[in-house]
Image: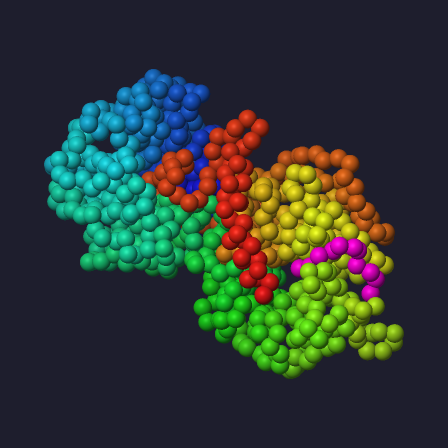
Amino acid sequence: MHLYSVFPLSPNNAWVVGMSGTILHWDGSGCKCWSLVASPTTNHLYSVFFPDVANPNDGWAVGQFDLATGLPTILHWDGVAWVLVDTTNGIAWLPAQVGTLRGLFFLTPSDGWAVGVGTTTQPGVVTNIVHWSGTWGAGGSWTMKATPPAALPFDLFSVYVVSNTATPIGGYAVGGNPGAGIILFWDGANWNPYGGAVPGAILRSVWMISNTDAWAVGDVIGVNPTVIRLSGTTWGGPMSISALGVSSLRSVVATDSSHAWAVGLFGSSTNAIKWVDPTWSAVATPIFADLYSIRKDATGNDFWAVGAGGTIMRSMDGTSWTAWSSPVGPWTWLPFSPDLYSIFMRTADDTWAVGMSGAIIHWDGNSWSSYASSPTTNNLRSVHTTSATSGWAVGDTGTILKLGAGPSWSVVASGVTVHLRGVFVLPNGHAWAVGDAPNPGSPAMILHWTPPAGPWAAEASNTPLGANLRAIYMLSDGSEGWAVGELGGAAVIDHYYASCGGGGPCWTAAFGPPIPANVATLNSVFIANNNPSDVWAVGNVDPTGFASAIHYDGTMWSRVAIENAVTGAFNLNTIAMVPGTSNDGWTMGDPAATSVIGFHWDGVTWSAVTVHSVPTLLFPIYSASFIASEDGWAAGWFGTLVNWGHKIDIETTTTSTSTTTSSATTESATTTSTVSSETSSSTSSSETSSSTTEETSTTETTTIVPLPGLPGFPLEAIIAGLLLGAAIPILRRHSRLRQR
């Protein structure tokens, strides 16, 4: 779900609008969260504006042309609800005379402007400039204003007016068509074509510092970023900024003549740049996504930026940016994001994720931050914590890190050089790490830490020689546990007892119940509700084409069918149950040919979950962790982070497969039904804005957006299939890298 425009009134009050009529509100004094607000439209909204920041009950939003009414979408906020404006309450023109509106600006509450598409995009429109005059609810209305004939074919994206009396110029509107830009100026009575040189670029945003000093940004054919600056009455440039790593620029904001910011599509290294007189420089941001809007509040010290996939960022100083999870994401991207192999959510404000090249990031309940001083560059495969200052992470070549006060991570000697792939910590401080066999003639590696001082010591795993263990899970009292993995692509299961036949602890892989036939590599294991008779393990697709998913009932392991004709089969990398339950769990993995993100367990059946707010999910999920049914995180390929805790539109496809609490799991494939459901939560996010946006149908961005469907075949599913074909070799490569 793309977000196209943001408008902060104050540090505690901000609005965002976007795709499909999405409206979000920031409450910085109460919940300190972003929340969805009821919208009277499903048309895309491209710009939002509040004329008087001291009056939070008078706001406007504009957007997409409505084919049913023949009018552009215009909304008004009266402090209670967003109201759709039409010919009965404020629009003074006939249907089809004005098309989609892209930019919005108010000089005063009774004097506002909106600009939009021209005749090239929407043949038949009479103008691409409209004006608001008067007071809402007291006779005020939107009327058409004359567009210079030469400008009517062009799309206008942004407008800014500083005065109706300044001479010779009081405002500017900018836009363009591919290969040609357009600049209009306001002289207090009419809009006129700018007579100077205009770059061959679409200008997408303008910001005026005064009537003689302004910035405009855009792009040449959606790729090369363009920046021009007004000096007096002459626009100069474009400036050379291609080397800064940003692609097309979508929005600009300035605090004074010496400081400005612009955001746009992520290029080679960034999506934001900053002007500190006399140069532009790249800005490091925590979001690896296209940005469409940036705006500051009245103080000039509080910046928001928004963009693709529900991206929201905030900066309180214009220099350091923080990413917030979004109620319409659910994606969060990190810059040059490494794969994230493991995530553990201890509480709502304490979640750690680890991954490739020693990556460590932390969620504090509001935002993700990178642990800048990771003590290793080795891949980290698993993380588990028991308090804010106690936990472990393990990884390649015997890497083990310990969490301590600060919080801080430090290296602890493991005494081994094999890849360690799973770690689990008990409340009493005992911990286990599992990993690969040192050589083909040795069993899998299992290490045990005895508090308070250790050291890590090897335990006999008793697995087949050459086996590799990938995950471990223990009962909270340490009396039993399970580790799972593979040998030559076939499943391996190791069962731990703290007391074996009255003696000491032991691992019993060689003596446990048989593993069902054809079960492939197992990647994850979970004990539901701390019950040793309710254990799940999932893994790769087996030679017969079915995902490896099995259940242990205290006596035997049984095969469970998860995929169905709709979803197909794909590798399952993680399984997690909501703590304290046996009927609320998730398993996720590598992408299917649909937008299925995973499967949900309700105690009876596994149901495929499709997220529609992101048109296609092509990225593998490697790990998931939950603290409640509506509060959890998943992490995966290329820094992907998915949050459950926000309202997202999902479709659940139920597979008729069930298990009982006392007997073996059984399989069935008698019926398949589809029902719709929603996941909701009070969690929210913050960050990002801008007064200009782009048509979602353009091919200039790399982010897919929902498009009209073909009968019986949603177009986004077709695009997903095409992209999946191209992505499969890349995904396979990453899968091989992850398994090394």
Residue 33, given in percent of the width and then of the height, sits at: 49, 49
Q: Is residue 475 above or below residue 248?
A: below
Q: Position of residue 331 (x, y in %)?
A: 51, 49
Which residue is located at x 43 percent, y 27 percent? 84
Q: Is residue 157 visible?
A: yes
Q: How many marks?
A: 0
Residue 580 is drawn in which quadrant?
Answer: bottom right
Q: Main secondary structure of the magenta part?
A: loop
Residue 372 locus on image (x, y percent): 45, 68
Q: Is residue 241 left or right of residue 493?
A: left
Q: Is residue 515 magenta?
A: yes
The extreme top residue here reads 94
From the viewer's perspective, is 644 left or right of 5? right
Between 510 and 356, the residue placed more toward the observer is 510
- The answer to whether 446 appears left or right of 480 in the picture is left
**Residue 700 within the magenta-colored segment of the rendering:** no
Residue lying at 37% horizontally and 32% vertically, measured from the top left: 62
Residue 241: x and y in percent read 26, 53
- In this view, 88 is above or below 251: above
**Could you tell me which residue is drawn at 63 percent across and 67 percent down?**
421
Q: For the C terminus, which image quadrant?
A: bottom right
Seen as rendered, the residue at the extreme right is 501
* Residue range highlighted in magenta: 512-523
x 67%, y 55%: residue: 540
